[in-house]
Amino acid sequence: MKSNRKKKAIIIPATWLIAAVFIIYLAGVFYITLFAWNYGSSYGPVGPGGRNYNLEPFLSIYRIAVYSPDMTGPLRILAGNVLLFVPFGILFPYLVKRILGTHSMLIGLVTVFTAMLMSVMIEIYQFVFTYRVANVDDVILNTLGGLTGYIIYRFSRLIKLIS
């Protein structure tokens, strides 16, 4: 006996797809910031001082910009910290808008604040559980990345790329 029923295509709503991309993105951020080696920005467990931190805003940004022998170090470190949180600023407000069903400038503030809070939590975790540098400048750069991503998100909404 043969069934006349046609198989229906499985359609994944855009919100679920973006939520999955956001979760994969977060996993990548946590891997990069908490588990991957940080290319010499801290002393490691055998170096002098072990755990290290910087609470003076813009100190390490200044040192990296002025004392780097070439431009690859500043680009990788400074731009990398900003770019790391740009996807957060794009994906997070999209999901918040879908959950709340509305959009307002409050979502922008929540996005930037949440990016900053996530960065602060990463820096605290780095100080407590790893031998990496906990740095206020990373929080500043990550927050700037979240803000940049949110600006991209808002601009894309203006030109109707993201509903």
Image (spheres, rainbow, N blue to C red):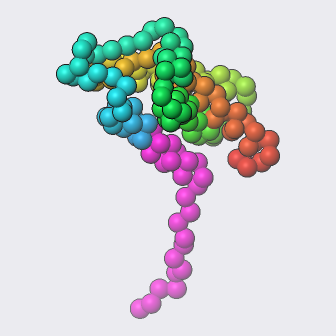
Left or right of 31? Residue 97 is right
As drawn, 159 above or below 39: below
Front residue of this view, candidates 50 and 74: 74
Q: Quadrant of the N terminus?
A: bottom left
Quadrant housing residue 113: top right
Front residue of this view, candidates 159 and 134: 134
Q: Identify the magenta region.
A: 1-26
The x, y position of residue 37, in whole percent, is 32, 34
As drawn, 112 above or below 152: above
Q: Residue at x 45, y 90 (%)?
A: 2
Left or right of 10? Residue 109 is right
Front residue of this view, candidates 114 and 65: 65
The x, y position of residue 4, in whole percent, is 52, 85
The single residue placed furthest to the bottom in the displayed view is 1
As drawn, 123 above or below 29: above
Left or right of 132? Residue 57 is right
As drawn, 53 above or below 71: above
Left or right of 88? Residue 108 is right
Front residue of this view, candidates 142 and 80: 80
Q: Residue at x 73, y 36 (%)?
A: 154
The single residue placed furthest to the left in the displayed view is 46
Magenta span contains residue 8: yes
Is residue 38 in view? yes
Quadrant housing residue 58: top right
Quadrant housing residue 140: top right
The x, y position of residue 119, in whole percent, is 47, 23
The single residue placed furthest to the top in the displayed view is 56
The x, y position of residue 23, in whole percent, is 46, 42
Is residue 61 in view? no
The single residue placed furthest to the right in the displayed view is 159
